Image (spheres, helix red, strand yellow):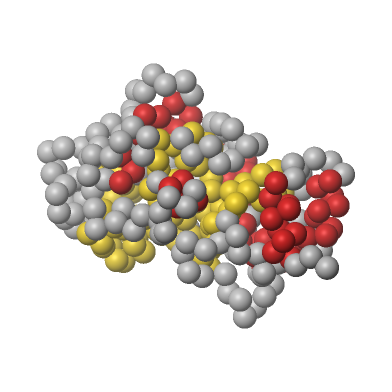
Amino acid sequence: MKSLVALALIFVIIPAVPGKSDFLNRMLYNGLKPKSCLEIKYIRPSIKENGVYTIFNERNSPYHVYCDFKSDALFVWTLIESFDRNIGVWGSKVSNAWRSQRPYYINAPYDDTEPPHWSVYRMTAPNMLTISKLNTTSHWRTTCNFNDYAQNITKDIERNDYMRNNMVNANIVLIRQYYCRNFNYVIVRGYACVKCYLPFWASTNYHPTFLASHSVNYCGRYKFPDSSPSHQESDFGHYKGYSTKHACSSFGSSTANWWLGGLYQSLTNTML
């Protein structure tokens, strides 16, 4: 009898079409319909391999997502968006660039049925909202160049430019204006700030972003070295200004990756 891990690998590569999807749902998910990668983990704790899996939207219709089960110990993440600097630069003329320059409450999906297209991928706003409202979704994070890790080019994710926060402090799916926010963890060019009060931007025409160059003048007034207040350095998106020393914006092909997820509490071994 094949192991559950082997079945998971089969599941990754079979399209979510009617009939096949129902069969695989019964076989892998015990008839349950997980709405995030973390809920997959609660249903099938043995699944450990990153890749494309099927989850279900609020209407219980299946769709594909990219799941990260292993880069952050104890956390499980669902990819909601990925874009490169060429797409993220404010005013970019690249086709469909506007989709990566809007907040998440605006519905601007791109290649949402075929993840992960790391250079430009974005989930629908209703699906993001569904995941964000789950009891299991407690955090969000932003990574840089996760595609290198996914393709085994690197052995670990980029740790020198990374951002993580909980949904209570800042719900990125709903945020639509400037706020001073408490952050669990932000690291820019290797300089980390833990449990800091930092500025965070979003608006109708602004993708959510953190400006390391402005943090010294706002909120907790934390200074990230090598960040000049006179230069608007947008980090992890909305590149009205950017630093080539930041991993997400070093090159035109450098990517920023946004995720929803939470802690997998193995002792409970159940969907919360």
* Quarter residue 135 falls in: bottom right
Q: Can residue 147 be seen in this view?
A: yes
Q: Which residue is drawn at 67% across and 75% down?
A: 269
x, y percent for residue 63: 70, 43
Residue 98 vs 162, above or below: the answer is above
Q: Which residue is drawn at 39% across and 19% down?
A: 93
Q: Residue at x 71, y 58 (%)?
A: 8
x, y percent for residue 32: 79, 60
x, y percent for residue 249: 30, 39
> In this view, which residue lies farthest toward the bottom?
267
Residue 230 vs 259, above or below: the answer is above
| Screen quadrant of the N terminus | bottom right
| Screen quadrant of the C terminus | bottom right
* Quarter residue 194 falls in: bottom left
Q: Residue at x 58, y 74 (%)?
A: 265
Name the residue nearer the viewer: 153 or 250.
153
Q: Number of labelled discs?
A: 0
x, y percent for residue 82: 47, 40
Name the residue nearer the viewer: 146 or 218.
146
Residue 99 vs 151, above or below: the answer is above
Q: Can residue 132 be seen in this view?
A: no
Horizontal side, residue 7 vs residue 243: left or right: right
